[in-house]
Image: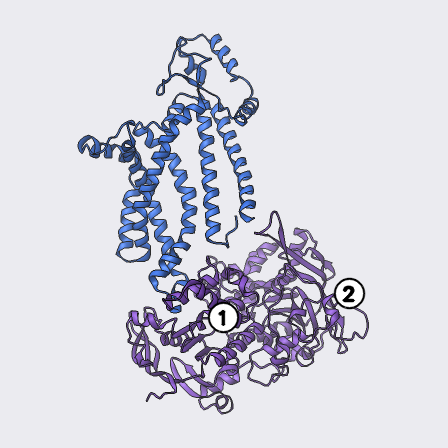
Amino acid sequence: MQTNRSVLNVSQLSVDIEGRERRRILNEISFTLEADTVLGIIGQSGSGKTVLSRALVNWLRPPLRISGGSILFKGVDLATVNETAMQQLRGREIAYIGSDPANALDPTLPIGRQIAEKLMSVENDLARDAADRRVLQMLDAVRIPSSRQRFHEFPFQFSGGMMQRVMIVDALITNPAFLVADNITQPLDVTIAAQILRLLKELQRDFRTSTVFVSSALGVVAEIADRVIVLAHGEVVEQQGMHGLLDRPTHEYTRRLISEMPKIWGEEPLPTAVETPASETVLSVRDVSKTYSERDRNRFFVWNHIQAVRGVSFDVFRGENLGIIGESGCGKSTLSRLLGRVEAPDTGQIEFLGKDIAHMGRRQLLGLRKKFQLLLQDPFNAIPPHLTIGRTIAEPLYIQGGTSSVEVEKRVRATMIEVGLQEDLYDLLPVGLSAGQRQRVNIARAMVLDPELLILDETLSALDQVEQAKLIELFGDIQKRRGITYIYISHDLSLVRRVCNRIAVMYLGRVVELASNTDIFFNPQHPYTRALLSAVPAIEERRYLPETYLMEGEPPSPINIPAGCSFRSRCPLPIEICASVDPKLSATPSDGYAACHLITPIAQSTINS
Amino acid sequence: MFALNFLLRRIVQGIVIIGLVTLLIFTLLRVVPGDPVRIMLGPMVAPSVMEQVATELGLRDPIPVQFGRYMLQVMKGDLGHSFIRNAQGGSTGGSRGGETFDLQNRAKVSELIANTIPYSILLAALAILFTVLISFPLGFVAGVYSGKWPDRLSLYVSSVLVSLPNVWLGIVLILLLSAWGGILPAIGYNGPSYAILPALVLAIELAPVMIRSIAVSVANSLQENYVSVGEVRGIKRRRMITHHVLRNASIPLLNLFGIQVIGMLLGSLFVVEYIFNYPGVGLLMINAVFQRDFPIIQAIAMLSSAVLVCVNILVDLAATNIDRRLQY
């Protein structure tokens, strides 16, 4: 059975969860990992892929237990080997990278120290300075900038993407025979995830590490894997080459997985997203900025100023869906706090229905809040656990006052029906509600005031595809009925592609491009928009290739923003002027706006004029 | 640079805190009933003499004036003179009666404190040592085997210890170890061995809190993701615990140590010294309270808050050095 070419032979592997009753999590999994290849394992959440990846390195904790089968690695059965022998293999021959790089290392020690510690405990006779040298070499190999300095920095000083690079260094520094990468790109932004994926591909080629790559995103696995295993309900339902799987899926589950992949260019947006809305302005944002201050640890009485939002301007028209997209740290959450008037901007105006809410007093604001509501991502912490659902939804009516309790109950019940909550939930506590139902409670609580504008800050991000689709439909229905306006703030390109009329792309606190749905996806003007599109994990053909548009590096720190164009450091097409002059948001030939020197402005007009 | 910035800010804050505590105690002492002049001069003195002495001592001035005068003195390094005690000896009781009381020849508070403080430092250090010896092994084992029998054992032990009142415990220990057993000396001070029993009482009072905190803090640190990731990275569990878990667990412990233990020590130390008639600052303080000896009470209160402030600054400085994410 075992050939020279195979590194890992898994046969009939089963894992049970032991409790009052035994339940099978993985059932008789068999596969072979060939040397110097990448084996992808794909499955939706709950399919058992994380359990499998942990079982492969014999890292299951009670109540999980391997109940049968074998994992042959170099003649050793990892499923039955004792803990001491396993400890010898882990870290040296077998490496594992998880999906939570931020919490993978001791937060109180420098990362270089910790990698060297691992190296020295795996290779006992290694001297400390030799270990340090090897760590530095590897940090350079994964292209961590100024590695010598970063060696001495602490985990919290690293961004998610940089920390994942650190963990790749940690895993590959002993040149292991095989590597398990468990959902390593999941917490990262698309452009960063694409960089990590590219890096891992290169390193895999250079180090000839046989890799098991586990992910729930088919688009990600398609990028890197040679062969794929499809996992469903703890069983292997399909196993074949990557291309064969995409072209000729044999199992029903795989076909459904492929068809459920959100598509960007193939899929038509919802009809509401393309209809031209009426041109009455609901919200007008003019040159809004917000800066936060934080004490600088290394200098005397110096405060760092974090420029979260830097001069953002746009209009929102009645009945439209405006999308605001960008990666983490681009300022979109701060912007949503400003638009929802949770915080006041430092400068600029936010005119809602012709009134400037940026500098409005508390009392006046309270009255106006009826008309605009903010919905957030986390459906769990937003609902008080000790109030009945009906009471929770009624809360804004009581805050606004002036409604009799009979009327309140009538309106709450009507709203519950409208958002698809069963009326008998009225007197129940929110215990045991699903994420989708909870999000509906949040929606009902906002809708009960009959607002004209809803700001949705990643409201659908915590939900699975099916629930997300249902809520998108619900938002569409409400819009048709009430003529409501939505602002979708999201990092999910396929979501805004489906629902938004116009889309603003944010980078480092600025809007860098604002254009119609079609233009953003088919004719983007700003190089950052193209980089974003090139990085989306997709199984369809890309319009913009990462080789052309996706540069190395991360956004500059919002504390010290360099002069000139802030995207310059990652731009594939920088020109001389970019280093000195910050481009303004200007009209593009295709009726949109972009902040880039490469675009010949048809008129020297900015959105302000 | 950060450390300097930090120290400067914290010392300024500390001085403000000490100033406020001093003002509070100063005011309260003068508001509560009981005229110290009556105690100084005894019951037989005529009211006119009393008034004269009180005026001489400045006790009839408005409180803000008295406080201002006192603070000026303190800034010059003068903590004032005892109301009651004479410069020569008489360390325990206050001498009453006009004949023996000499207004001009009263003991300096700074000298009284300087004479007693070494004993208190010895007692406190010994108490902390005992506390660590008792609570560290118990708490550590309980934390590592969280939920198993060592954890439950340490919970029982600390539950028992926490419910022993120190006054009662002191008397029982004196009875058992000193009166009946004859192993340890108990009352007064005549060599360092006299500090062992009171230190034991203090340690038993402090240990339960420490045991539980160490156990919880070690158990929580063990739950952190990086600990189990460390195992799959190839670092042995033993090394993870000794090099990483203990380091991380020490941060909440340091804070607890700073606030609770030192605070309790300052409170209980006084009581325990009184029980054992141990000649430290605590005994001085308690006698001073009984005798309305304002300058002594005042100075020791100020000293206590200064110790508390200093210890907290040191603890926070240590914590920020261990975990660089912390900012105070």
Estimate the spatial distance between the alpha carbons at disc 2 and disc 1, rounded to whole Å.
Answer: 49 Å
Q: Residue furthest left?
A: B180
Q: Nearer the viewer, residue A113 or A531?
A: A113
Rendering colour (chain A): purple
What is the quadrant of residue A227 in the picture? bottom left
Callouts 2 and 1 on one subunit = yes
Give the class, few, some or many, for how many residues have Cα within 10 Å of label 2's Cα (few <14, many ≥20): few
Task: Identify the coloring.
Answer: by chain
Give how far across and how far down residue A350 sits, in percent: 71, 60
Q: Which residue does the numbered mark 2 point to in the structure image? A: A608
Give how far across and how far down residue B272 sits, in percent: 32, 32
Residue flagged by tag 2: what amino acid is it? Asn
Give how far across and how far down residue A8 sits, in percent: 37, 82
Provide the letter of the chain coloured blue.
B
Quarter holding the N terminus of chain A is bottom left
Residue flagged by tag 1: what amino acid is it? Met
Give how far across and how far down residue B153 sits, in percent: 26, 51
Q: Which residue does the numbered mark 1 point to in the structure image? A: A138
Vertical relation: B55 (above or below) A241 = above
Vertical relation: B12 (above or below) A313 = above
Q: Is residue A155 left or right of residue A606?
A: left
Q: How many marks?
A: 2
